[in-house]
Amino acid sequence: MAAHRPRTRTRTRTRTFLGRLSLPERTIVANALRTETVGGVLLLLAAVAALLWANIPALSDSYRTAGQYHLGPAALGLDLSVQHWAADGLLAVFFFVAGIELKRELVAGELRDPRNAVLPVIAALCGMAVPATVYALTNAAGKGSFAGWAVPTATDIAFALAVLAVIGASLPSALRAFLLTLAVVDDLFAILIIAVFFTADLNFAALGGAFAGLAVFWVLLRKGVRGWYVYVPLALVIWGLMYNSGVHATIAGVAMGLMLRCHRRGGEEHSPGEHIQHVVRPLSAGLAVPLFALFSAGVAISGGALGDVFTKPETLGVVLGLVIGKATGIFGGTWLTVRFTRASLSEGLAWADVFAVATLAGIGFTVSLLIGELAFKGDAVLTDEVKAAVLAGSLIAAACATALLKVRNARYRALCADEERDEDLDGVPDVYVQDSPAYRLGMAEMLERRAAEHRRLAAPKAARGGVRGGAGSGAVAEVPGGASEENDRPA
């Protein structure tokens, strides 16, 4: 009889969703979010300033005059209004940074591994498809225009982080990284939407020139040519040609950002993409986006205008898409992906935390305002109403997220304190090294030094206590609550 062979069980490996980031990724994410948070606060201030400027009777005319003031070389087709320069020019810087961030995520970040990329990509896609569907259903029921279907699909990471900074929510790094990755993927699809659905009649000569400029840009990068005086003029030429081609000019920024090398080679502390992003991100977050908000968020607000936001199908669809569509789309896409890929939620986090972050992603300020301007370009009144709807939807989403995050804020603070703990004072959080023998030996030596110091400080007091007990008498000072020598019972 053949010997019985025990059957081997195959274990199904489970992946952890929202688990701890690697130390290099954590550092990169922390630096990016720090800049975006500062930029988000400036963005909030710019939006408030725009609303005040546009609604104070003595100043409202000057706001419209400033926004419509034209400047630029007409011979090059660039005699644009200040508002137009902010939307097409300054936002190209924003999308340039978005392109670098997307490239870095694809080659060195969370999107590098297809297994890790599946979840944020599906969550972002659902977070765009569901708001668009909510908008379409609202306008189908109310017989409104379907032109604004893309308005509620965007997430504004800077505005979201500014809300976190204002309310003092201490989100763990994994949740913040998830929000950042969502926004990066969201920006990618927003770029595709703008390129495909909001491209005017094409000027093929200008478009060919833009592609030729991009080819030169790529060759110079591959040859290792350095110097801002080479790339900045070339970038301006590419941007101008892209604008005149009929394709939205911000696409030029994205294309150049995607061309930069974002992986490190031997001996490099930072890749060229990381270095340029570090230099340009403050310009984007601190200047370009706030100025765009200043000249785009100034809509007239009155009781009637606010009433129209919740009664007209176009504006109601935007509000419902941002508040309900974003939260249900991102949360639903995330839950389904985790459910069918046998992943498990990271220890210490709950699905309520994912829903709170999904609700926070309903803040769709910058790109939503841009798409709103493109979608209703020929109707100034409806454009302003849609802008008001974007503001209202973003504020409602921010308020809902604030309430949800505050409930769990104590838990978040505890998780963040655990992440930041550095007892051996080596500059590296203990969670990354606590299992290594070197860390344990170092901690043991440090505790021994502390114990020796405590014994040294306690020795004089113990000696004085012995003297009071009687010199040479062998008496021992009484210890309150001490144990007797018999049966270990209290004395």
Image (cartoon, rainbow, N blue to C red):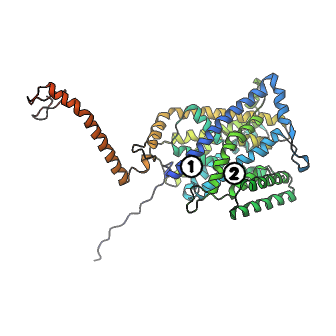
Amino acid on which the number 1 mark rests in the picture: Ile
Residue at the image position 77 percent from the left and 27 percent from the top = 53
Q: Nearer the viewer, residue 407 or 69?
A: 69
Q: Which mark is residue 189?
A: 2
Q: In the image as oriented, which residue stretches furthest toward the bottom?
A: 1
Quadrant, the C terminus = top left
Q: Secondary structure at mark 1?
A: helix
Q: In the image as oriented, which residue stretches furthest toward the left?
A: 473
Residue at the image position 86 percent from the left and 59 percent from the top = 204
| Quadrant of the rendered image containing residue 312 | top right
Q: Nearer the viewer, residue 429 or 418?
A: 429
Q: Position of residue 231 (x, y in %)?
A: 74, 55
User: Disc 1 or 2, which lies upstream in sequence?
Assistant: 1
Q: Nearer the viewer, residue 72 or 463?
A: 463
Residue 313 appears in the rendering: no
Q: Nearer the viewer, residue 216 or 254?
A: 216
Height in image: 396 above or below 226?
above
Residue at the image position 85 percent from the left and 32 percent from the top = 65
Quadrant, the N terminus = bottom left
Residue behind mark 1? 28
Q: Position of residue 129 (x, y in %)?
A: 67, 47
Q: In the image as oriented, which residue stretches furthest toward the top?
A: 58
Amino acid on which the number 2 mark rests in the picture: Phe
Residue 86 appears in the rendering: yes
Q: Is residue 271 left or right of residue 63?
A: left
Label 1 to label 2: alpha-carbon separation: 23 Å
Q: Is residue 318 left or right of residue 460?
A: right
Residue count near mark 2 (Cα–Cα under 10 Å), binned few <14, some 14–19, many ≥20 = some
Numbered label tally:
2
Height in image: 148 above or below 484?
below
Q: Secondary structure at mark 2?
A: helix
Q: Which mark is residue 485?
A: none
